[in-house]
Image (cartoon, rainbow, N blue to C red):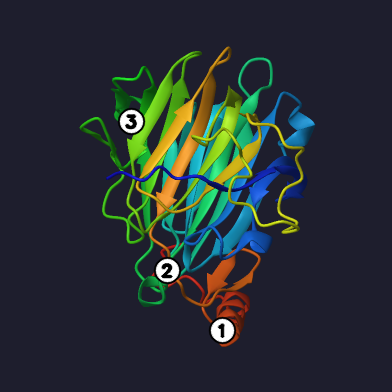
Amino acid sequence: MAETRRIEKVWKSRPTVEGAGVRLKRAFGFQEVPQLDPFLLLDAFRSKDPADYEAGFPWHPHRGIETITYVLAGEVEHQDSLENRGVISAGDVQWMTAGSGIIHQEMPRGERGGLVGGFQLWANLPAKQKMMEPRYREVKAAGIPQAKTKDGATVRVICGEVAGVRGPVREIVTDPELLDVSVPAGKSFAHRVKPGHNIFAYVVEGEGYFDPGRDPYAREAAGSGWSDLARPCVCGADTLVLFGPGDTVEVTTEGKPVRFLLASGKPLREPVAWYGPIVMNTKDELRTAFREFEAGTFVKGSRR
């Protein structure tokens, strides 16, 4: 018998500054490890003011992780040490496996009117794949299929499967699922998920009920310090919802629609040694990575 996942925790994203001065909202990061294992970080960016984003993210290294960039408005121009370069626009996804080491830059550009918006999600790699060959995948909006559920939801399937529709990003070591879900007012979304995976939703816009009991604190331990909200029974924009155990996620709406990202992944349950853009398993591995970066030997086999 299916067990619907209840809400474990819920909190609001917080403003922060990254890169060369990009203003964004951090949904989770270092403080939340390992609750969202294998996910490490989720940043949301949206602004019409070029001063908030035009400095971008100049050349910087990554090792031991995957970075997933999903653009909703505007463009992000990118280059990397594998000699990949290009532009991802609204609806496009860049799924980069840093593996043994990559150096890249990402420079946002606004559409007419200046608007830029999207997300970057970091996913950890298991110890045995930390030093795998780097790889890069760019998926254009036209290549991301859309599923319609019997309950009235529309889902862009980036990674995973909904209603028999499979996403284009496959063969990822943490067995993730990444969905962009829109539920009209007065409709619902029910989705079977893998019981052992960690799952979260991030509300992009609108509002919805993410718990069948309509209580976002149904499983929250008193005094945990995680939540910075009052006790509403509906979750709105910029809210991160972490689900508890089960094999089904259910979301319902009333007078307003809701759009949210839904992500799941297989937890690694490994030690995390994290500093800046590099995530390894031990401090010694971190020190090695930064020594190699300083010595110019960080990128293995690069032509750059």
Residue 47 sits in which quadrant? top right
Residue 225 higher or lower than 258, as above or below: below
Q: Position of residue 7 (x, y in %)?
A: 55, 45
3D distance between C-alphas at marks 2 and 1:
22 Å
The 10 Å Cα crowd at callout 3, few under 14, some 14 to 19, many 20 or more, is some
Q: Position of residue 253 (x, y in %)?
A: 52, 20
Disc 1: which residue = 288
Disc 2: which residue = 268
The residue nearer to you, when weighing 27 against 92, is: 27
Which badge, 3 or 1, is on the more N-terminal residue? 3
Q: Say which residue appears at 64% left-offset and 44% top-offset.
A: 217
3D distance between C-alphas at marks 3 and 1:
38 Å
Secondary structure at badge 2 equals loop
Which badge, 2 or 1, is on the more N-terminal residue? 2
Disc 3: which residue = 144
The residue nearer to you, when weighing 188 against 212, is: 212
The residue nearer to you, when weighing 90 against 218, is: 218
Q: Say which residue appears at 63% left-offset and 77% top-offset.
A: 294
Q: Which image quarter is the N terminus in? A: top left
